[in-house]
Image: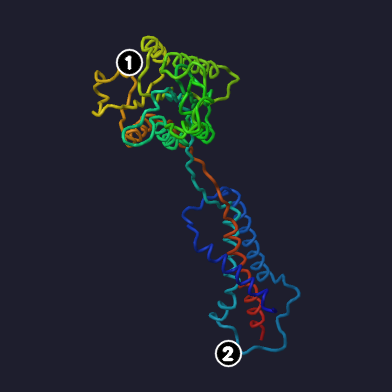
Amino acid sequence: MKFAGLDMIWSVVLDGWRDLMSTNFDQIKYSEVELAIKVGVVLVLLVLLKMLWAFLSRLFDWNKYSMKDSGHPILYSKRMGLLAGFFLSLPKLLLIIPFIAIFFAVAGPFISVIKVEKKFVEARTRLDLKDASGSMLGTFKLSGKSKAEVAMNAHLKFLKMRQGKNDRTAFWVFSDDPYPVQEDFVIDDDLYYLKAYDAPWELSGSSLDSYSEEQWREYIIPRSRVVQVAGQGGTQLSGTLKTAVWLFDEDQRKQEQKTYHGYKNAGKAMLIVTDAAISDFAETKVEIQELSKRNVKIYIIFIDETTVTQDTEQPAKAPELLEEVVSRGGKFFPVSDEKALENAYAEIDRLEKITVTEERKVFTTPVFYKFIFVAIVFFIFLIPLGVSMELLSYP
């Protein structure tokens, strides 16, 4: 128990020593160099004054309390030699080290660390539209799943790809008319993902209460994924695109308001998941042209049921809807299996580049305590040593 205090002091000294040895002194900078120089000049002047006083005292015999003869002459052989005098004065000479350490501590030493932070300065605005018409209930190739289910799963994977990329997104499903899932543009990835996960797979115009339990068990999609909306079931896209035009215009109007504190709009895109079996192409074409005027880039995930893989570079093979999208600078991705669907979303993720700036922040850590530690350690060692030497210097 009686050595517990010493053990603690020794532990603190060891920790301080390890910290000192791990310091890269080349990285240390000083913020108060002028102050340190002034302190150093004052210390040097004090030392010079002390030396001058000692010299003048000897020269003019100012030490009036001293006596030339003590009555006990010292033999020459017993007088202190030069080497002994040096060692006896060594503690005083070594005091320069802690004073130099204090001098560096006064200079305000610090280590600067540069941290690079990525900052999104622009947000991409994207509207996702997913076909929820009756034609999406067909089986997707040999997967045993409906086209609607496969499309939803791939869409969720795409949202995972885009997480953290600062997208402002809205999500609607459509049949003959649009149906909002996330009505306005938001930048909350988690909220958007949950809404996309819970989105309906089918907008049905039929009365759901008329289906028996047996019929629901045989139905290709779960009962919870069907939403009854009067007049739905077909595939008309023009009304949905008209709503898209209104959404982008309204968002632009908000951004132009001085009171709006949203993100700067870096680009606009629209993602449509459909089998392209629409019945109102003429009206849809007009709305595609309107979106093109607003610089909205359109991507179509084409749920392709053909046995031959289509080529996006040869739109003549594609339905009229896809041809029109390509002619307006958009792009479509024909997919006939789940892997191709994932690849299509990965390609869109690559095309939808984000604008990121790197902000360099400098953090400073003061390290004056390291020099104070050196001074304290030397004082602890030199003061007892100096006292011992003084005692030994008396005959």
Q: Is residue 83 left or right of residue 45?
A: left
* Quadrant (top left/top right/bottom left/bottom right) for the C terminus: bottom right
Viewer-nearest residue: 336 or 102: 336
- Which residue: 54% across, 25% down? 209
From the image, tell me which residue sits under label 2. Answer: 77
Q: Is residue 31 above or below residue 379?
A: above
| Image quadrant in which you'd find residue 257 | top right
Q: Is residue 70 left or right of residue 273?
A: right
From the image, tell me which residue sits under label 1. Answer: 324
Q: Secondary structure at mark 1?
A: helix
Query: Label 1 crowding class (10 Å Cα cut-off): few <14, some 14-19, many 20+?
Result: some
Q: CA distance from mark 1 to mark 2?
A: 115 Å
Q: How is the image coloured?
A: rainbow
Q: Is residue 351 above or below residue 117?
A: above
- Which residue: 63% across, 79% down? 389
| x then y, percent, for residue 238 | 42, 13
| Image quadrant in which you'd find residue 88 | bottom right
* Quadrant (top left/top right/bottom left/bottom right) for the N terminus: bottom right
Count of numbered tags: 2
Residue 122 in sight:
no
- Which residue: 66% across, 68% down? 54
| x then y, percent, for residue 141 | 31, 33
Q: Secondary structure at mark 2?
A: helix
Residue 209 in sight:
yes
Q: Mark 1 or mark 2, which has the lower sequence index?
A: 2
| x then y, percent, for residue 290 | 41, 12
Q: Is residue 113 above or below residue 85?
A: above
Q: Amino acid at mark 2?
A: Ser
